[in-house]
Image (cartoon, grey):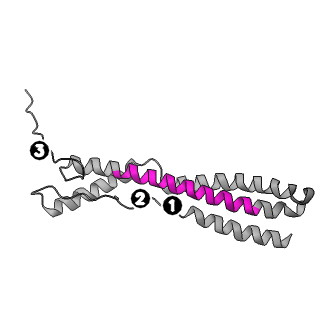
């Protein structure tokens, strides 16, 4: 029994490290160029504002998504593994711990993979918000032409 506990502890520790594989965007994954004729200091200020805007536009972080996915599939994997372990060797309870450990590891790995996919989606949403912000400030966004500033119409 002590050996099974040690195995489960080691596998659980490994599974927990898989949660850390996804991360919240630390910045845009695309290149925006300064608007022609705008001073670089303005570009830097706009960049910081747009990074903050993009980060605030996310309603969740990649870390939260990864943790939820990994925990959910790890628990399911451990339960399925425990049942499979109990059924092995003609129903011997000796294999329950081993089955749970293997199920925990497999479930955690699958959850981490799902978490990484979710992290890509969070990065995509961040990039879109960042692009929109920088474009609205007149900077050069790949795939979009530079628009001429819209002049405010005087109120009558």
Magenta stretch, main secondary structure, is helix
Q: Quadrant of residue 18?
A: bottom right
Nearest to N terminus: mark 3 or mark 1: 1
Label placed on residue 8: none
Residue 22 - label: 1
What residue is at 41 percent from the left and 54 percent from the top? 123
Image-based side of 45 in relation to 51, left or right: left
How crowded pointer 3 is (Cα within 10 Å; few <14, some 14-19, many 20+) is rated as: few
Label 3 vs label 1: CA separation? 39 Å
Name the residue located 70 percent from the left edge and 68 percent from the top edge.
11
Labelled pair 3, 1 in contact (Cβ < 8 Å): no
Viewer-nearest residue: 153 or 31: 31
Q: Secondary structure at mark 1?
A: loop
Residue hosting label 3: 148
Distance Cα–Cα, label 2 vs label 1: 9 Å
Task: Report if the CB atoms under discs 2 and 1 are less than 8 Å apart.
Answer: no
**How many labels were placed on the picture?**
3
**Residue that mark 2 sits on:** 25
Quarter in which the C terminus is drawn:
top left
Q: The residue tagged with tag 2: helix, strand or loop?
A: loop
Closer to the chain start, of discs 3 and 2, is 2
Residue 127, horizontal then vertical, whole percent: 35, 52
Q: Which residues are magenta?
A: 101-127
Compared with 59, 22 (above or below) is below
Magenta segment: does it hold 131? Answer: no
Q: Residues within 10 Å of mark 1 (few under 14, many from 20)?
A: many
Left or right of residue 126: residue 82? right
| Residue nearest the viewer, comparing 48 with 12 | 12
């Amino acid at each position: 029994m002590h050996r099974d506990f040690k195995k489960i502890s080691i596998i659980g520790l490994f599974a927990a490290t898989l949660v850390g594989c996804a991360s919240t965007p630390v910045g845009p994954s695309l290149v925006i160029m300064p608007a022609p004729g705008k001073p670089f200091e303005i570009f830097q200020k706009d960049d910081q504002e747009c990074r903050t805007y993009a980060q605030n536009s996310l309603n969740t972080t990649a870390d939260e998504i990864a943790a939820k996915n990994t925990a959910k599939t790890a628990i399911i994997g451990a339960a399925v593994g425990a049942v499979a372990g109990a059924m092995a060797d003609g129903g011997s309870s000796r294999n329950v711990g081993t089955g749970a450990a293997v199920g925990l590891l497999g479930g955690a790995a699958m959850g981490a993979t799902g978490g990484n996919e979710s992290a890509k989606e969070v990065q995509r949403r961040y990039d879109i918000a960042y692009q929109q912000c920088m474009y609205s400030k007149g900077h050069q966004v790949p795939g979009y032409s530079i628009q001429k500033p819209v002049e405010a119409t005087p109120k009558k």
